[in-house]
Image (cartoon, rainbow, N blue to C red):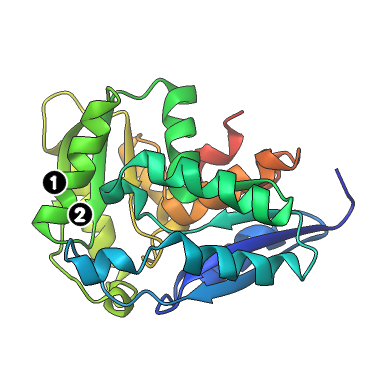
Amino acid sequence: MPSTLRLGVLTPSSNTALEPLTSALAAAVPGCSAHFSRFKVTQIALSDRALAQFDDSKILAAAELLADAHVDVIGWSGTAAGWLGFDSDRRLVQRITERTGLPATTAVLALNELLALRGVTRLALVTPYTADVQQRIVDNYRAIGIEVVAERHLGITVNHDFALVEPAQLLALMREVATAVPNPPQAITTFCTNLRAAPLAEQVEAELGIPLLDTVSTTVWGQLRAIGADPAQVLGWGSLFGTR
C-alpha cells in the first residue's frame, strides 16, 4: 500500500453532497485524498431518457480523466445499479479496469459486500426516489436473498434536490424504518449518494442499535479495501468501517 493514497471518484454532475463528504472521509486516512470526475446526471427515473444517463461510454470517459491524475482506485459513487440491476455495476468495474488498468468498485457493489460480510438478510431502505424506482431496488435485493422489511422514499426525481433534504428529516425516516416491523432490520441503508446522511451514522447507531450503511461511505470503504488500506482508520463515521 502506498504512503499516499488517491481515491478517484466518479460523480453525478448535479451532486453536491458526495464530494465534501467523500473528502472528509478520505481525510480520516493519513496521506489520503479524493479526486472527482463528473458525468451528466440530472434526473432519477425509469424513463428511457433518465436511464440513458448511465450509459457506460460516458462513465468510462470520466474514468479515463481520473486516471490522468494517477489515482490508485476508481469508485463509482452512485446507486443506479439499484434499479438497473447489480450486473450493470459488475460490468462497469470490469470495463473501468480494462480501460484504465486501475482497480474499481461502486457504492452498490461495496454495499452488497458489506451486507454479505455482516450476514444481513433483513434490510431497511431510505431513499429520496419515486415509488417505481424504489420498487425496482426492493425487487433486486429480494432476488439476491435480502428482504427489504421497511422502506421510506420521498418521491423526488430531480437529482440536485436530493441534497436539499435536511439531515433531520433523514434521521426521522431512519427512526421510522427501525420501528416499522416487529423484528427490526439488521441494517439501514441510505441509498443515494446525494444525501447528507453519512455523518449521522454514529448518532443512528447509538440511538437505534442498527448499523447505518450509507452509500457515500460504502464507496470509500470499498475503495480502501480494493487498494489494501484498512478502512478501520476512518473513525467517527459508523461501524461499517470496522467491517473486514
The answer to whether one can see residue 127 in this image is: yes
Q: Secondary structure at mark 1?
A: helix
Q: How many marks?
A: 2
Q: CA distance from mark 1 to mark 2?
A: 17 Å
- Give x and y (percent) for residue 68: 76, 70
The residue lying at 24 percent from left, 45 percent from top is 125
- Give x and y (percent) for residue 229: 75, 41
Q: Which mark is residue 173?
A: 2
The three-letter code of the residue at mark 2 reads Leu
The answer to whether one can see residue 236 in this image is: no
Residue found at the very far right of the displayed protein: 3
Q: Which mark is residue 135?
A: 1
- Give x and y (percent) for residue 139: 18, 37
Asked whether, in this view, residue 223 is left or right of residue 40, the answer is right
The residue lying at 36 percent from left, 47 percent from top is 204
Marks 1, 2: nearer the viewer: 1
The N terminus sits in image quarter: top right
Looking at the image, tell me whether mark 1 or mark 2 is earlier in sequence order: 1
The C terminus sits in image quarter: top right
Would you say the residues marked 1 and 2 are in contact, meaning their CB atoms lie under 8 Å apart? no
181, 208: nearer the viewer = 181
The residue lying at 63 percent from left, 67 percent from top is 23
- Give x and y (percent) for residue 148: 20, 34
Q: Which mark is residue 99?
A: none
Q: Residues within 10 Å of mark 1 (few under 14, many from 20)?
A: some
Q: In the figure, 121 relative to 193: above or below?
A: above
Asked whether, in this view, residue 127 is left or right of residue 237, the answer is left
Asked whether, in this view, residue 72 is left or right of residue 192, the answer is right
The three-letter code of the residue at mark 1 reads Gln
